[in-house]
Image (spheres, grey):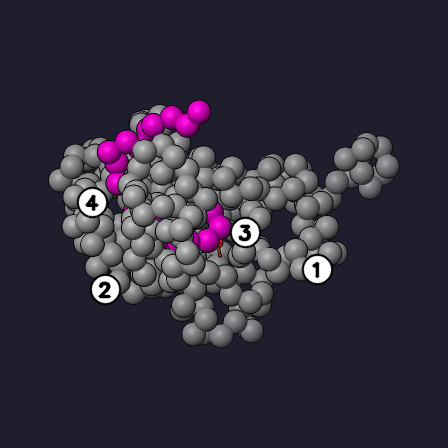
Amino acid sequence: MPENRFTNRVVFVTGGTSGLGADTCELFIAEGAKVFVTDLLERDILQRLGHENAHFQQCDISSVSQCENAIKACIERFGRLDVLFHNGARLADLATVVDHDVETFDSVVKTNLYGLFYLARAAIPQMQKQGKGAIVTTASTAGLFGDYGLASYSAAKAGTVNLTRTMALDHAREGIRINCVCPGYMVTPMTDGFRAEQHVHEALLESIPMNRGADPKEIGRAVLFLASDDASFITGQALVIDGGWTAASGCPNFPKLFGKAKL
Ligand SMILES: NC(=O)c1ccc[n+]([C@@H]2O[C@H](COP(=O)([O-])OP(=O)(O)OC[C@H]3O[C@@H](n4cnc5c(N)ncnc54)[C@H](O)[C@@H]3O)[C@@H](O)[C@H]2O)c1
């Protein structure tokens, strides 16, 4: 039985028509929210969510004017803004810094980091007027540790974690809580490439203590928790949800290598 933690609340979502974003929109609607869904593409999201409690607007989060217009449109349409779930992001092809072209680096950082700055800047004044609000951002374990070949993505996600913390400090006294989730490996279109080659996927699963990727709803439920009053004393936190991935130091699984354990 879903709870109704978001009745009469308005949630603005970026990257909301695929993967984690779309699944989390469903969870918010199931708990009574009105959801203003944004993304680059519509992808039939309103067929999935229904027209009654959801509205779609195209928004490129690397554009300051599109971010500002979308927040304005959300407030005009639904009369308020309670939750910003900033989730849209892109990956670049795996490359070292030397091989990473400058335009791609710029684009990834603009999309994955600047978008948060643009949207928070536009959304927080409305939350200040309402005397309350919650922002949840999607960072990544890649924002907490280095990952091979992911220079622009990791840099932007690390920026997301620390921008989240800093904004949380700045607005804590106004009743606005700001947190991020840091997923490990999730099974979404973004990671199709890792499943396309069997040896890559096997190595990926082997590195995760729970030996599987997350269903996006497993992350979405944490997003709802952080956005809800259940998390009323939690702000400035980066919640890692990774099946145990980052509990390891990176050293090999010696018991397994020595044949001493079924790990
Ligand atoms: N899949 C994983 O393993 C994983 C792990 C850690 C973090 N994440 C993060 O989770 C979030 C959701 O990703 P996902 O895995 O659901 O992948 P996804 O590709 O299904 O979703 C990403 C969404 O972001 C949108 N997007 C990309 N560029 C945009 C732009 N310029 N403007 C607006 N929207 C844009 C895409 O259209 C897409 O809908 C992302 O922030 C991603 O970095 C994913």
Residue 26: x and y in percent read 41, 41
Magenta extent: 1-20
Q: Residue at x 29, y 65 (%)?
A: 63
User: What residue is disc 1 on?
Assistant: 197
User: Is residue 18 at all visible to an observer of this figure?
Assistant: yes
The amino acid type of the residue labelled 3 equals Thr
Q: CA distance from mark 3 to mark 2?
A: 29 Å
The reply to whether callout 2 and callout 1 are in contact (CB within 8 Å) is: no
Apparent side of residue 5 relative to residue 104 in the rendered image (left or right): left
The answer as to whether callout 3 falls within 8 Å of ligand 1 is: yes
**Residue 103 position (above or below residue 171):** below
**Residue 244 x %, y %:** 60, 36
Q: Secondary structure at mark 3?
A: loop
What's the residue at 38%, 59% (across, down)? 42
Quadrant location of the C terminus? top right
The reply to whether the C-beta atoms of the residues labelled 4 and 2 are less than 8 Å apart is no
